[in-house]
Structure formats: C-alpha cells, structure tokens
Amino acid sequence: MSEGTTPRPRVSDLTIDDVSRHSPAKRRWVPIALVLATLVAAVLAVVALRGPHAIEVATATARPAASGSAATVLNASGYVEPRRRATVAAKITGRVTEVLVDEGMPVEAGQVLARLDDADARRQMEAARANRDVARAALDEIEVNLADAERRLRRTEELRRDGVASEQDLDTATATADALRAQLKVATRNLDAAGAQLAIAVQNLENYTIRAPFAGIAVSKDAQPGEMVSPVSAGGGFTRTGISTIVDMTSLEIEVDVNENHIAKVQPGQPAVATLDAYPDWRIPATVRTIIPTADRQKATVKVRLTFDELDPRILPDMGVKVAFQERAGDTDEAPSAQSVVPRNAVRRDGERSVVFLVDGDSVERRAVTTGRELGAEIEILAGVPPGSTVVVDPPDDLADGQKISITT
C-alpha cells in the first residue's frame, strides 16, 4: 500500500472488546426480552386452545309433549280466594277475657274462639230467672185460691137450690170465682213474659261467647285478653272489631280479571291450567266455575272464578296465580302430534322459518324446526327437537351455528 492511501477495514478487524460485551446495560435487557417472549407465547397458546370467544347463554330441556294437550286461548293472572272467609266478631261491646284460638289452628263449627267479660250479663240473667220464679209462685197462689173459690161456688149453688143460701150469696161466690179466673190468666201471661225475659237474658249471656261459624283454619288472631271488642269501630284504634279470621280451606278457588275484549273466549266449564307463583313448575288443572255478570268500568275487566279440580295443602289463600285457559275438547280439529315442548323464547324467527339452537357440548347447532300450538309460556315442536335435548333460551342476536358457548346457571 502506498503512502497517502487510507487503509480499508477488514472483517477480522470488526471485534467487540470485552468491556462492551459485558456492559451492565446489555445484561439488563436480556432477561426482560425473555420474559416478554414467554408471555406472548402463553397468550398465543391460550387463544389457540380456546378458539373463538364463548358467549354466555341460558338453557332449558325440551320435555316430552303430553298426549292430548290442549291449546291455550287466553292467559290471565289473579289470586287464590276462598268462597267462605269470615272475620269473627262479637255481637256486643265487651272486654276480652280469654282467646282460645291461634294462627294456623283448625277449628270446628260452633267451637269457642273467645270469651268476653260476662259478669253483668250473668247478673241480669239471674235477676230474670228470679222474676220468672216470682211469676210462677203468684200463678200457683192464684190457682189455689181459684180452686177454693170454685168449691165455695158449688156449695153455694147447692144451698141455693135447697133454699138455705140467698141469691146474693150465690152472686158473691160466682164473682169471686170469676175474678180469680181472670187473675189466673193475667198471672199466666206474666209467667210467659218472665220466661221470655229470661230467654233474652240467656241469649245476652251467650253473646259473650264467640264461636266459629263454620269449620276451617284460623288465619289471624286479631284480639288479645284485656282488649275491648265491638261489632262497630269505636274510633281511635283502641277497640277491636274482630277476634279471628276463619277460612274454609275446602272452598279455595281462583279469581282472575279478564280483559273485556277477550271475555268471549271464556265459558263456564272450560278447562284451564293454573300455575302458582310460589310453585312455577307445578301445573294445576282447574275449571271455570262462573263469570261474574258485570264489568269493572275503571279497569275494563270482568271477574272470572275457577275451581281447582283437586285441592292440595300447598294451595293457600291470597297466593298469586297465573291461569292459561284451554280449548274445550272438540273445539278444534285434531292437531298433529307434538314431539316435544320447549319455552316459547327458545324459538327464533328467521324469515319464514322457525329455528332453535341446540347445545352440542361447548357449542351450538342451529336447527330449523316445525312449531305447533302455543301452550302458555311454552310451544310445541312437531319436528326438529327430540325430547331431552338442551336448547338455548333467549338466544343472543349474534349467536351463530357452531358458536362456542358458556352456560350460565
């Protein structure tokens, strides 16, 4: 190489000195890079394993269709009401001395429920009995005097026929007997009046004992010993008007309000299915008993009463109930036999077709179905969903065939 020429660098001259190779800054970046690479790899692995994002859904099981199930023509809601319910009260105003009933206690007709303080009434009854006894004694005395007067009259008549007694003696004996007969009638009437007064006193005393008007269950205890009760409210809230409320549990029925626009769909004797709010899975057969022949102009409804085909101890007064009025047998042509029954909100309309989403493991299968009659909150599936299949309820709008799902509880 000649003088004045710049030397060209060689590859062998490109080396890193030991100080730069083992500098502290480079040693810090190496483990950070390793950690970041590990996290990225883990995320990619989780995404690869889980696949697409899973959608949370609720599910229900398709149940077998009941043979001969009738279509629902109308739905209504109401309450369980007893035909016989009585708040038992006293006929008089008085202070409670004893209450012999408690909530939930069965009672028989005529059973004593409570007693009031009857000291005054008992004294009045004793006074009436004494008056009756005095009237009876007066009657006995008059009867004795009348018997003696009639004997004297007979002797006077004999003496008059013999010419011994005068006409005046006969008149006096006759007048005495007649007067005693009149007194006897008055005494008899007095005895009857005293007996009637005694009966009133006895009834007044009985009014201090409150009895059950019919057999049933006591559902409330409205008074306590020491309180005043009255058949009418005395004001101020210090006087009770009832002792206990009795319900005849054998007279429980359903009362619902039906919109007057749909009352033509309801007829006496029509079958129905009742569902208590407390037992939503319990379907109770019922029958329309009567339609109350008047409408409520404020609510535009008509009251309908239904009887339970069979009573059950779980049915209690004032429970909320939903009623599905069914078609009568023979009202419609024979419908095709349903394969299964699913909730109505499990069926989605897709144009002219009805579809459901069947659960298949952790994904769903979109399937077209043939629907039948609506049965309240459920619908018949004539084809497409075998009984026992799991279907998605209220499927989200973005749910598609093959979509991964997560079932909510």
Image: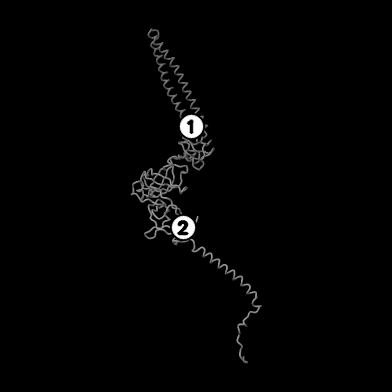
* Viewer-side label of 1, 2: 2
Q: Is residue 38 left or right of residue 188?
A: right
Residue 314 in the image, given as x and y percentages of width and height: 47, 43
The label shown at residue 138 is none
Residue at (51%, 37%) from the top-left corner? Answer: 101
- Horizontally, residue 69 falls left or right of residue 313, namely left
Q: Disc 2 marks which residue? A: 360
Three-letter residue code for mark 1: Glu
Work out whether residue 279 or residue 341 is closer to the camera in this orientation and state it.
341
Kindly give the residue lying farthest to the bottom in the view shown: 3
- Of residue 385 and residue 246, the one placed in the foreground of this image is 385
Scheme by which the image is coloured = one colour
| Among numbered discs 1 and 2, the one appearing first in the sequence | 1
Which residue position is annotated with label 1?
206
Residue 177 in view (yes/no): yes
| Quarter where residue 37 is shown | bottom right
Crowd tier of the residue under label 2, counting other residues whose Cα lies within 10 Å: few below 14, some 14–19, many 20 or above: some
Q: Which quadrant is home to the N terminus? A: bottom right
Q: CA distance from mark 1 to mark 2?
A: 75 Å
Rendered position, 272 above or below 96:
below
Element marked by disc 2: strand
Q: Looking at the picture, does residue 93 appear above or below residue 264?
A: above
Front position in the image: 30 or 72: 30
- Looking at the rendered structure, the secondary structure element under dot 1 is helix
- What kind of residue is marked 2? Asp
Image spot of residue 74 (x, y percent) = 38, 50
